[in-house]
Amino acid sequence: MDILERIDQQVKNNPVIIFMKGTPQFPMCGFSMRAATALAECGLPFAHINVLQDPEIYENLPKYADWPTFPQIYVDGELIGGCDITLELHAGGELKTMLEKAVTQKAAQANEA
C-alpha cells in the first residue's frame, strides 16, 4: 500500500486523529503536547500516530494535506490544522462540539454496517 493511501485510511477510519511527535502520554515537542492536551480535555476518544516512529509518515504527511508542520489534527476526515488552530477552537468551545459530532457520526455509521 502506498504511504499516502495508508495516511488516507488512518484519516478516514478515525473520527479524530492527531499526527504528532511522540504520544499523548509522552509528547516529544511542546506543540504536540498542547494540541494533544486540548483534545484530551474534550473528554472524547481520539487516535494518534507518532510520526517520529514512522519515517514514511513523517516525510509524506505534509504532502497529504499541504500542511508543512506537526502536529496535524483531522476531524471527520478533514484537516482542522495544527496546534494554534486547535487551541483557538478549544478556547472557544468549538473543538469539543466538532469532536462530539465526528465521534457520534462514526458510531452511527458503524451501527448501520
Image: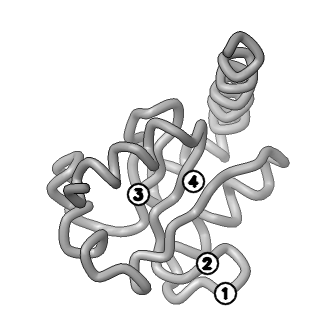
Q: Residue at x 64, y 38 (%)?
A: 95
Secondary structure at numbered mark 4: helix
Looking at marks 1 and 3 on the same chain, the residue that comes earlier in the sequence is marked by 1
Residue pointed to by mark 2? 23
Looking at marks 4 and 2 on the same chain, the residue that comes earlier in the sequence is marked by 2
Q: Would you say the residues marked 4 and 1 are in contact, meaning their CB atoms lie under 8 Å apart?
A: no
Secondary structure at numbered mark 1: loop
**Disc 2 to disc 1, how far (Cα)?**
5 Å
Q: Residue at x 28, y 82 (%)?
A: 55
Residue pointed to by mark 4? 87
Q: Nearer the viewer, mark 3 or mark 2?
A: 2
Q: Amino acid at mark 3?
A: Gln
Looking at marks 4 and 3 on the same chain, the residue that comes earlier in the sequence is marked by 3
Q: Amino acid at mark 4?
A: Leu
Q: Residue at x 33, y 44 (%)?
A: 8
Q: Percent x, y for residue 62?
A: 21, 61
Residue pointed to by mark 1? 26
Residue pointed to by mark 3? 72
Q: Percent x, y for residue 9?
A: 40, 44
